Image: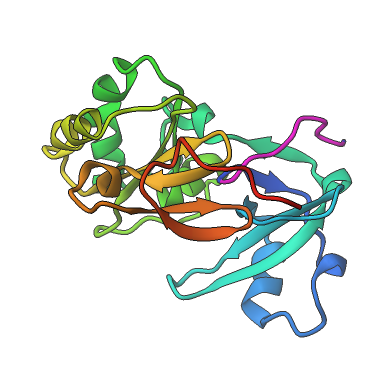
Amino acid sequence: MTIPLAVLPHDLLWGLRLSDLAADAPDWVVEVISQGQPVVVRRASMPAGQVAVGVRGPHREQRYATTMAASAIERRVRPEQLTHSGSVNIKQWPALEALRQVRPVMEVLGLDWGVAGSAGFELASGFAALHPGSDLDLILRTPDFVSRRWAAELVEALENAVCRVDVQLQLADGAVALREWAGTSRQVLFKRSSGARLVSNPWHQPRMCA
């Protein structure tokens, strides 16, 4: 079944086939896809009908970039769907405890937010991805400008969690780390499909010519 809605970075997708992989794909990638694990949408410019995705391996350094046809997508889970998910893993990792701790903080913001990274992967798929030292990765949809002071206050509000909480602000056409925007550096790293660059205000960027 084709998923008609546009996918976004951090979405998890099912449907990548072994036949879609390059002939030189590492053995661990073949194994992961054979197990039915999802892939995560990457931020990259792609032609119509194609989606940039990444395959997660059992080790942190095992990340494999590839593409899949949008027509091959069988299922999609967005980070926003995971904010109240219960872990299918009997182990209560610190990252999942942190999710319970910060949920009230995130919900009071009145903005769409979701769970990404290892926690999101495990919650969505049931495949082990977390460990005792895992951070909690969240996304926060901020299409409209938020001040650096606002960002700093949010960072402070998340500091009491049992593990580090990293939030990525998702703008209409890119993303910036909350901690960077909350900091004192004049410029921050703004990630777009066309690449990453240092900017002073991610919400006010000139449109790039084709």
**Residue 66, how many percent across, how many down?**
71, 66
Which residue appears at 86% of the width and 36% of the height? 2
In this figure, what is the number of numbered marks? 0
Q: Is residue 151 magenta?
A: no
Quarter occupied by the N terminus: top right
Front position in the image: 14 or 166: 166
Q: Is residue 149 visible?
A: yes
Quadrant housing residue 90: top left
Front position in the image: 108 or 103: 108
Which residue appears at 24% of the width and 60% of the height? 133
From the viewer's perspective, tell me whether residue 19 is left or right of residue 52: right
Quadrant housing residue 16: bottom right
From the viewer's perspective, tell me whether residue 65 is left or right of residue 98: right
**Residue 191, how many percent across, how many down?**
50, 53
11 in relation to 82, above or below: below
Task: Give the extent of the magenta segment.
Answer: 2-9
Q: Main secondary structure of the magenta part?
A: loop
Which residue appears at 39% of the width and 41% of the height? 201
From the viewer's perspective, tell me whether residue 43 is left or right of residue 147: right
**Residue 60, how many percent across, how many down?**
43, 70
| Extreme residue in the bottom direction | 24
**Residue 193, how many percent across, how many down?**
62, 53
From the viewer's perspective, tell me whether residue 170 is left or right of residue 106: right
50 in relation to 34, above or below: above
Q: Is residue 92 visible?
A: no
Which residue appears at 64% of the width and 66% of the height? 32
Colour theme: rainbow
